[in-house]
Amino acid sequence: MIDAKRYKDQRPSLVVEGGFIRPRVEKLIVGRREQTKLVDGMLRQIDIVQQVVPEVEVRGVLCFIKADLPLFGGWFEVRRGRVCWPKRLAAKISTASSGRLIDVDTTVRALEERLFSA
């Protein structure tokens, strides 16, 4: 599941707090603002879709369009989701495979029957 976000000239980054004594907390920072709520929204969407089609492994990606791109990397995980840029996502999708085949038509019908369009 891809959730596209347009944040012009702002760089997304991962900030990790805590660890040894305090619980580990991962935060998504976009530009100078804490935007972990974007990750929370994506995780809610993943959970909803997973309930509708439990036989399909659902993964989530926040894809930042027109963002300030890093020279290296461009892909990081935050909690159960990933954050990336369009070119990096296209490359990852074209090479990624879980090895499991799914019936796309059946999956689409199940989602259309149970979920409302935005």
Image: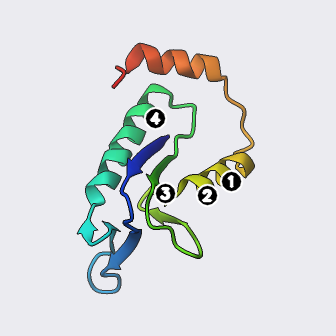
Residue 88, numbered circle: 2
Q: Position of residue 67 (x, y in %)?
A: 43, 61
**Mark 2 secondary-structure assignment:** helix
Location of the C terminus (image quadrant): top left
**Mark 3 secondary-structure assignment:** strand
Residue that badge 4 annotates: 50
Query: Nearer the observer, disc 1 or disc 4?
Result: 1
Residue 91, numbered circle: 1
Dividing the picture into quadrants, the one containing residue 37 is bottom left
Q: Residues within 10 Å of mark 2 (few under 14, many from 20)?
A: some
Query: Nearer the observer, disc 4 or disc 3?
Result: 3
Could you tell which of marks 1 and 4 lies nearer the N-terminus?
4
Residue that badge 3 annotates: 82
Q: Are marks 1 and 4 in contact (CB under 8 Å)?
A: no
The structure residue drawn at horizontal position 43% and vertical position 45%, both measured from the top left corner, is 4
Vertical comparison of 42 with 13: above or below: above
Q: Residues under labels 1 and 4: Cα distance?
A: 25 Å
Q: Are marks 1 and 2 in contact (CB under 8 Å)?
A: yes
Q: Residues within 10 Å of mark 1 (few under 14, many from 20)?
A: few
Q: Is residue 90 left or right of residue 28?
A: right
